[in-house]
Amino acid sequence: MSIEPKIVIDEQDQEKWNVILDDLRESGAINMFGASSWLENNFAVPRKEAQQIFNNWTETYLFNTSNR
């Protein structure tokens, strides 16, 4: 059994993805659980990277909404 290394997204890149995902959420265009696939299809982001971007965004989103 091999363990895949965690994909690290550059902080500045993640901030840009966060804006894109925030805009997508606010638009209501899709259920956000499909956002990683949406990133794959619309930005040609590899699946594992798209999943990590989405996971990072959810952590940031949950942090920001819990501090309101």
Image: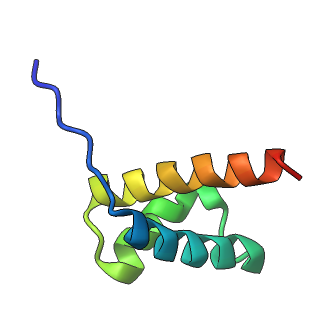
Q: What's the coloring here? A: rainbow
Q: Residue at x 29, y 77 (%)?
A: 44
Q: In which quarter of the image is residue 45?
A: bottom left
* Image quarter of the N terminus: top left
> How far from the left and from the top, in percent, is residue 64?
74, 54
Camera-nearest residue between 43 and 19: 19
Could you tell me residue 28's position as x and y percent? 75, 74
Q: Which residue is drawn at 48% across and 77% down?
A: 16
Q: Which residue is found at the position 41% from the left and 71% from the top?
A: 12
Farthest residue toward the top? 1
Q: List x then y, in percent, for residue 30.
A: 65, 70
The number of numbered discs placed on residues in the rendered structure image is 0
Of 32 and 19, nearer the camera is 19
Q: Residue sitting at 39 percent across and 72 percent down?
A: 13
Q: Quadrant of residue 53?
A: bottom left
Residue reaching furthest right? 68
> Outermost residue toward the left?
2
* Horizontal side of residue 36 vs 2, given as left or right: right
2 versus 52 height, above or below: above
- Taking the image as shown, residue 2 lies to the left or right of residue 44, namely left
Residue 50 appears at what percent x and percent y?
37, 60
Q: Is residue 14 above or below residue 56?
A: below
Position of 23 with respect to 51 (left or right) is: right
